[in-house]
Image (cartoon, rainbow, N blue to C red):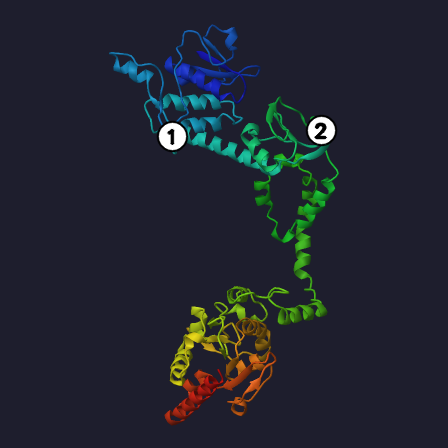
Amino acid sequence: MAKAELAHETDFDGWRKAARAFRLAGVEPAAARFGVEGAARTGSLFDTAHPRESGDPVLSRGKVSGIEDGGISPDGSAPTELGPRFRGDERKEKEQQFPVPKAFVDLAQEVILHRSADRFDLMYRLLWRLRDEPDLIKVVSDRDVADAMERAKNVSRASHKMKAFVRFRAVQDEGGEAFVAWFEPAHRVLEKTAGFFVRRFTTMRWSILTPDGSCLWDGETLDFGPPASAVDAPREDEIEEFWKTYYASTFNPARLKVRTMQGEMPRRYWKNLPEASLIQDLVAGAHGRADGMVSSQPSEPNARLAKAIARSVRDGSYEEGFVATSLEELGHGAQACRRCPLYRDATQAVCGEGSKTARLMIVGEQPGDQEDLAGRPFVGPAGQVLDAALEEAGIDRAGLYVTNAVKHFKHEPRGKRRLHRTPATGEVSACRWWLDQERRLVRPGVTLALGGTAALGVLNRKIAVTQERGRRLPLADGSLAMITVHPSYLLRIPDPDARLREHAAFIRDLKAVRDLL
């Protein structure tokens, strides 16, 4: 029987050295025993004698007389060969030499943190089998591999729980304020997890005390120390009651799932959590509180507040006090507009486009289906009519600025189609803020409104297009406005002769505008 004594419970380097020596000596797993100095050793239940009381070879802290040292490297780029080469005896060479994959070393470094007494034996059993089964670690259905992976998973879970459930309490020492926490991890994960707290609380001085060991961060250096007990840590601090009040106020009885909560927050950790004292009462009263929430009548909103909010949404800019300094900035701002509900069903806000110093601005009603998708004004059927009419009237569209009184497409679905709906007066008024900013930035000498909705946006009053059509209307900034029909009106006239007459009248209006430029 070969036995090894390790320096401490997580002495991976010591185990690796001992396992290497055992493997080179041909010690089978059933004959290998690993123990920890100063603790009850691990191994077989039938092993009753202490190593130093028997005549078996003993490996103290990774060393044993009569066994040649080999090598197990954690570097996966070039697997380490265990043992020296022997000439002439292939069987002995196979016994003494085989690669150790990095995956095994990584797995073993996790498994050694597990609290199970036979973890060293499990790791050595895997190491022994790797000689004849070099891909063993990839066989997740193997009993030993599955066992090791499950233990590594438990260690990882214990590290996660430590990150979640460590609770620091403030103390005062000669250096000022510091923080101390007591925690009892399911496995020996203090050193594995300490780096998380260094990154999380870099500017604090803190200590974490556990039954396995302790760690201290002084703001610059992380040190590890001996095990501690719960009496070494403070039991409460002055902000604990605030934390418990916050925890109780965020507890939602309607969403309580006790099994899920206990799975994520196991009872073993409750004794060290300040909020755990509240859990039992909160859970007991959850059902009644949830029933009360369901049966209670919804509270009425404050009528004055609702009216004030509605007025602010209607009359305020998308950002209070916003004044655009360019058309590009204005276009970006319009995408965030919530001054009326039209934004909810539209693809995007469609602002104007064209010359930034245009002498003529043409204002339509609102984007149509194609304009809403393209994000540009007058690109649909009505836009094609307008382009042809401008060309016939001798007006270069490239020198114009074209926009709409309303920036979002108002429509109603009809099967797969989206049918146009005329904007309401309140929607036009809400969008006038954007039109006024466009006119302020472009500063056109003449603004041509196409239809009644556009005229309402430009003039801030309702007009009869047939009565005001073709007239020069002065605006507050000293420029002029003229009114004519919208190009879509020409598309809706069923009688060909009437369509020709209205088209000719539309061209005359455009020529009259041209003469004002």
Q: Which mark is residue 230?
A: none
Q: SS of the residue at dot 1? A: helix
Q: Closer to the N terminus: mark 2 or mark 1?
A: 1
* Image coordinates for residue 459, horizontal then vertical, percent: 58, 82
* Image coordinates for residue 303, horizontal then vertical, percent: 71, 70
Q: SS of the residue at dot 2? A: loop
> Closest to the observer: 282 or 98?
98
Q: Residues within 10 Å of mark 1 (few under 14, many from 20)?
A: many
* Image coordinates for residue 358, horizontal then vertical, percent: 48, 75
Q: Quadrant of the N terminus?
A: top left
419 is higher (above) or lower (below) than 241: below
Q: Which residue is mark 2?
A: 175
> Closest to the observer: 358 or 74?
358
- Quarter assignment of residue 342: bottom right
Q: Nearer the viewer, mark 2 or mark 1?
A: 2
* Image coordinates for residue 371, horizontal then vertical, percent: 44, 72
Amino acid type assigned to the residue bearing label 1 in the image: Ile
Measure the alpha-carbon separation of dots 2 and 1. 50 Å
Q: Is residue 212 visible?
A: no
215 is higher (above) or lower (below) than 461: above
Q: Residues within 10 Å of mark 2 (few under 14, many from 20)?
A: few
Q: Which residue is mark 1?
A: 137
358 with respect to 176 (left or right) = left
174 is higher (above) or lower (below) than 241: above
Amino acid type assigned to the residue bearing label 2 in the image: Gly
Q: Residue at x 45, y 8 (%)?
A: 57
